[in-house]
Amino acid sequence: MSRIKKFVKAVAAIAVVGLTAASVPAAVIAPGQTLFPPTQEADPVGGTVLFSTNASFTSSSFSGFLTSKVIFGDSANQFGGLTFTYQFTLTGGPQAASQLTVTSFGNLLVDVSYNALGSAVSLTAPTVINRSLDGNVLRFGFYGNDVQAGSTSALLVAQTSSTLWSISDAALIDGQSVNVVTIAPLPIPEPGTFSLLAIGLGLLAFIRRQR
């Protein structure tokens, strides 16, 4: 009987550890943080695509297109906000792409990962992901594993706490930088910003009354 009890306790302990591990954020990235190597996750999970873009780009270094999506209801998004995905293909050279940057993540909570699972073709995974000190810019780096002409990047995933989105700009970089239309969060201004705006509007109203 004692052996059975020990077995049951061991199974229960394993189950608790498993649940705890599953609930730990795997790839939350704070401002100024670098993830090396980045995490591959089977994200996003479900949800509804609210909007998508398929924007082409061309420069003297390379050409191709970037597909961007904003998803509502991704069940893997621990923050309960919108999920943004990015995937680009190079259709021509002569250079390869070593980095994709996307802006407008501000003070949001962000979980970043990539997904190359289940694809019928080979996808190029990023080797590093970092976030600028002010939190605004996400950089997906492919250093040492550049996306070559005729190749496609893995699906790059940013799960956020944002409830708003807007059209924005991304940049593909390798020696030169080329801007391309994308989708990004629309951060909510901090309370201090609203206070300054209110003060400014009040001053304008006061000046008009004095005239």
Image (cartoon, rainbow, N blue to C red):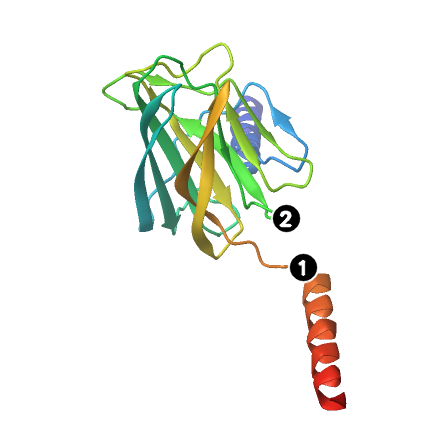
Residue at (35% x, 12% y) in the render: 94
The circle on residue 101 is none
103 lies above or below 173: below
Q: Is residue 130 above or below residue 206?
A: above
Label 2 close to label 1 by CB (< 8 Å) = yes
Residue at numbered disc 2: 107
Residue 108 place in picture, x, y as percent: 59, 48
Seen in the picture, residue 192 relative to 80 is either above or below; the reply is below
Observer-nearest of 34 and 133: 133
Question: Residue 8, can we see it?
Answer: no
Dot 1 lies on which element? loop
Residue type at tag 2: Asn
Residue that label 1 marks: 190
**Label 1 Cα neighbours within 10 Å, binned few <14 / some 14-19 / many ≥20:** few
In this picture, residue 188 sits left or right of residue 89 = right
Instruction: Using the numbered discs, state the Cα–Cα distance from disc 2 to disc 1 in whole angstroms.
Output: 9 Å
